Image (spheres, helix red, strand yellow):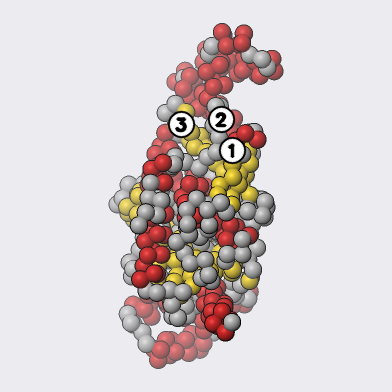
Amino acid sequence: MNFKSGKLRERLLIIGITSFFITLLILLAFSPKVFAQSKDPETEDQILLLYEVLEFIKENYVDEEKAQTDILIKGALKGMLEALDDPYSMYLAEDDMSDMEETTTGKFGGVGLYILKGDKGVEVARPIPGTPAFRGGIVAGDFIIAVDEESVLELTIDEVVKRLKGPAGTKVTMTILRGESKTFDVTVERAMIELPTVKQAMIKNKIGYMEILQFTPITYERVVDAIEYFKKEKYNSLIIDVRSNPGGLLSSVIDITDLFFKPGDIIVSTRSRNPFDDRVYRAKEEPIVDPDFPIVVLIDKYSASAAEILTGALKDTHRAYIIGQTSYGKGSVQQVRYAGEGGFRLTVAKYYTPSDISIHGVGIEPDLKVEKDKPSKEEEASLEDLLESNAVELFIKNNPQPDEKAIKGFIQKLRKDGIIVKDRYIKKMIRNELNKTNNNPPVYDLDFDLELQEAVKYLEQKKQKIGSN
């Protein structure tokens, strides 16, 4: 069966809608003939100013080695993009372009974290199971405040990623802020990270569970594989989990969303500065998921960009029920272009859901909001004491496969030591500690995942209603 297998070869593997020729400005500065052809006197004057300053610096700056043309032009390009005051538009040096290509293809040397910029530093959206960061005990919600003793508070996400990446076998130390005040160092040895894109498993009562971790060139094929697996297992409903999914390729999410809609249905539209660059993306193929199957999408505050495109399309068309927390709100589209030995990333459009809604800076509201269970201030202080003691780690070391009786006895001992953290927090910490040593942890955790529990409950009730009609 052909599920649009040729699409990935046909589409450019960059996020983009139109072309911007910033590098042309630099070329103009070195071509007096072009000045005469310019129809914009103001632009002509500014380019001439840039050229004059460039020449003066080259001839007069005290350190001649630092006043080379290529260094100055790269600095000008960087400053030009920074002047846009857009965190998603930036100049990319040659090694930055290589890093981006490695991330897109899904294999690189690093620690294994998805991260986002937060108010306390760089927030961990999720560790990738089986990676150095995962085994080092870093969890979602932690903040990285320094890398190798250098603060990251003033760095961009790309700059932090660059510091975390490196050859396999080299070490890096991350200073972690957990909760309000607990800080500690985690030193890990970098490894080759192969980004997983899709995980799937069956849940009770023929519910298919599919987690999409990122939208890469191979995600479409993995989603198709997962759906084929569900069909063999005779599934009758579906949960799509895009929590902590940071996004990815526009082409990838459009192909995947196409699997759920009839030809002609709107998936997403994009609007750029120039109306002739606006696009409306519609489904082209017949859906491979039964249109009568109930679907739930799980989102959280880390679900961004392409994850929000999929969620927005399924929500606006009432194709799916959305559960979780309000998503991140990245509704802009970037294009990556080469410029000399490096390149740049530029925001070229904003996208709109099928209902013509822009979620940029706002996010997608779930149909059912399930807030994370947060500890009280007293519980958080007690939790910090528990973390400081390494009691859970020592318990697992002495009890590699603890049963309920052993866990109950451990909790009772903690109570005698003054720990007031809820039982479910402690049990979750025990589960996490066990999973740290497991390179293939369970695909889902129905015991502690509140959003997943609500999704299963909704689907079971939905199927009962359908069955009684």
Instruction: Provide residue 249's location: percent of width, then percent of height.
Output: 48, 47
Identify the residue under disc 2: 20
Label 2 Cα neighbours within 10 Å, binned few <14 / some 14-19 / many ≥20: few
Identify the residue under disc 3: 338
The C terminus lies in quadrant: bottom right
Residue at left 46%, top 22%?
70
Occupied quadrant, residue 369? bottom right
Query: Considering depth in this image, is 423 or 279 the residue closer to the camera?
Result: 279
Q: CA distance from mark 1 to mark 2?
A: 8 Å
SS at circle 1:
strand
Residue 122 seen anywhere in this rendered image of the structure: no
SS at circle 2:
loop
Amino acid type for the residue under numbered disc 1: Val
Residue at left 47%, top 19%?
68
Residue at left 51%, top 34%?
344
Amino acid type for the residue under numbered disc 3: Tyr
The earlier-in-sequence mark between 1 and 3 is: 3
Instruction: Provide residue 450's location: percent of width, then percent of height.
Output: 54, 76
Label 1 Cα neighbours within 10 Å, binned few <14 / some 14-19 / many ≥20: many
Instruction: Provide residue 43's location: percent of width, then percent of height.
Output: 66, 19
Occupied quadrant, residue 465? bottom right
The earlier-in-sequence mark between 2 and 3 is: 2
Instruction: Provide residue 304's location: percent of width, then percent of height.
Output: 56, 55
Label 3 Cα neighbours within 10 Å, binned few <14 / some 14-19 / many ≥20: some
Amino acid type for the residue under numbered disc 2: Phe
Query: Considering depth in this image, is 91 or 4 the residue closer to the camera?
Result: 4
Residues at discs 1 and 2 in contact (Cβ within 8 Å): yes
**Total numbered badges shown on the rendered structure:** 3
Query: Considering depth in this image, is 262 or 360 the residue closer to the camera?
Result: 262
* Location of residue 339 with respect to 151 vertically, above or below: above
Q: CA distance from mark 2 to mark 3?
A: 11 Å
Identify the residue under disc 1: 348
